[in-house]
């Protein structure tokens, strides 16, 4: 099993290492980008630890303003390879969406690489729907699908 808690700046190195393992070079966040997301006052960062205290997954989300509206945005979700397909991704999404609801967010968006079929299947399972496509979003050559979920 695992426990979820808010990610702190002191977790940074472990989060960075896991992100490097989850994404190919150029798509994984740089140290500067990851630190900026973690430190942003409007970001929500949760991590999952195994019973031995090892980092096994995390999610970073933030609230963005779009005109009068505030929209939740999933920046990244990373689950350690050995821990996948055990419900941890779902637990991280559930926890972040619950926090978003608590602060009055009604919809959540994210981008996913057009070639990341596993993540697309995961998000569809989590009731996210495709609402757009951004050409060359990743490295100027891989398109992204924009997906959205309306929170109840
Ligand atoms: C995408 C990711 C976060 C999913 O995490 P996870 O802990 O494995 O997901 P869960 O176990 O909660 O999966 C819930 C359901 O989503 C679907 N799903 C998850 N991963 C899937 C995959 N690779 N292929 C097909 N369906 C998948 C399944 O329906 C699954 O339920 P099931 O295992 O009972 O069939 C994880 O694979 C990951 O970290 N990938 C690398 C990083 C990444 O691509 N992040 C998304 C960036 S946009």
Image (cartoon, helix red, strand yellow):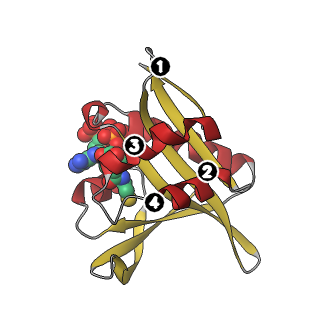
Which residue is farthest top? 52
Which residue is farthest bottom? 135
Give the CA distance from mark 4 to mark 3.
Answer: 11 Å
Q: Is residue 109 left or right of residue 82?
A: right
- Tell which tag, 1 or 3, sits nearer the viewer: 3
Residue 137, image x, y percentages: 38, 78
Q: Which residue is mark 2?
A: 38
> How many residues crowd mark 4 within 10 Å: few (<14), some (14–19), many (20+)?
some
Earlier residue among tags 2 and 3: 3
> How many residues crowd mark 1 within 10 Å: few (<14), some (14–19), many (20+)?
few
Residue 66, image x, y percentages: 68, 77
Earlier residue among tags 4 and 1: 4
Decide: is 40 above or below 19: below
Evaluate whether residue 152 shows in this view.
Answer: no
Residue that appears at 31% across and 59% down: 120
Q: Is there a contact, CB below 8 Å, between mark 4 and mark 3?
A: no
- Regarding mark 4 in the picture, which secondary structure is present there? loop
Front residue (pair 107, 17): 17
Q: Which residue is mark 1?
A: 53
Give the CA distance from mark 2 to mark 4.
Answer: 12 Å
Q: Which residue is mark 4?
A: 30
Give the CA distance from mark 2 to mark 3.
Answer: 14 Å
Earlier residue among tags 1 and 3: 3
> How many residues crowd mark 3 within 10 Å: few (<14), some (14–19), many (20+)?
few
Q: Which residue is mark 3?
A: 17
Decide: is 49 above or below 126: above
């Amino acid at each position: 099993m695992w426990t979820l808690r808010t990610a702190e700046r002191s977790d940074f190195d472990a989060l960075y290492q896991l992100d490097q393992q989850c994404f190919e070079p150029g798509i994984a966040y740089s140290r500067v980008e990851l630190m900026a997301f973690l430190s942003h006052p409007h970001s929500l960062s949760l991590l999952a630890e195994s019973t031995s205290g090892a980092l096994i997954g995390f999610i970073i989300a933030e609230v963005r303003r779009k005109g009068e509206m505030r929209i939740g945005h999933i920046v990244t979700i990373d689950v350690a390879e050995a821990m996948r397909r055990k419900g941890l991704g779902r637990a991280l999404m559930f926890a972040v969406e619950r926090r978003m609801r608590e602060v009055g967010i009604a919809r959540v968006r994210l981008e996913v690489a057009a070639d990341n079929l596993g993540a697309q299947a995961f998000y569809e399972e989590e009731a996210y729907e495709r609402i757009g496509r951004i050409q060359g979003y990743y490295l100027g050559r891989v398109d992204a699908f924009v997906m959205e979920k309306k929170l109840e």
